[in-house]
Image (spheres, rainbow, N blue to C red):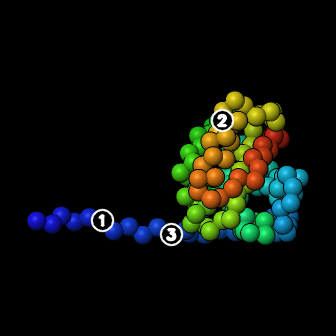
Amino acid sequence: MFSGVPLYTTRLVRERTFSFPTRDQVRSPADAAVVLAEYFSDRDREEFVVAFLDTANTLTGLHVASVGGLAASIVEPRQVFKAAVLANAAAVLLAHNHPSGNPEPSREDVAVTRQLVEAGKVMGIPVHDHLIRATRYR
């Protein structure tokens, strides 16, 4: 006797494009901050974003891995790296905002970063940096 087993297809769908100040190589945290500052400029809740980089460290795409409340967002490694694998990312930059304006990473921020760096090593997709954008929502 045979039973039906679902066959799945996974696709990466481009939702829209977002204009950035530059598409040059991201060579430093300062370069990454410039690129991501515009994205976070009008966010009133905490968002966790994954920036995809190619082998030349050029930004190739963004994925919003989590949208939280005013003070936190929950980030799962599977959500971060599923999108990175589908986008053929050679590396990733992690970024999230603190709508409170406090730039200091929380204990949870540090723990999540460590977890994602380790997951990236296993996946062969290095995490180049984790940035926190801390400007007050206006």
Name which of mark 3 and mark 2 comes first in the sequence.
3
Q: Is residue 44 visible?
A: yes
Q: Quadrant of the C terminus?
A: top right
- x and y, in percent, of residue 26 in the image: 83, 62
Pointer 3: what residue?
11
Q: Helix, strand or loop at disc 1?
A: loop
Q: Which mark is residue 111?
A: 2
* Neighbour tally class for label 2: few under 14, some 14-19, many 20 plus, Cα within 10 Å: few
Report, in whole angstroms, how far the alpha carbon at label 1 lies from the one at label 3. 16 Å
Pointer 1: what residue?
6
Q: Residue at x 85, y 52 (%)?
A: 29
The outermost residue toward the left is: 1
Whether label 2 touches label 1, CB < 8 Å: no
In this view, the mark in front (3 or 2): 2
- x and y, in percent, of residue 85 in the image: 58, 63
- The foreground one among 13 and 111 is 111
- x and y, in percent, of residue 93 in the image: 73, 54
In this view, the mark in front (2 or 1): 2
Report, in whole angstroms, how far the alpha carbon at label 3 lies from the one at label 2. 30 Å
Q: Residue at x 70, y 60 (%)?
A: 91
Name which of mark 1 and mark 3 comes first in the sequence.
1
Q: Helix, strand or loop at disc 3?
A: loop
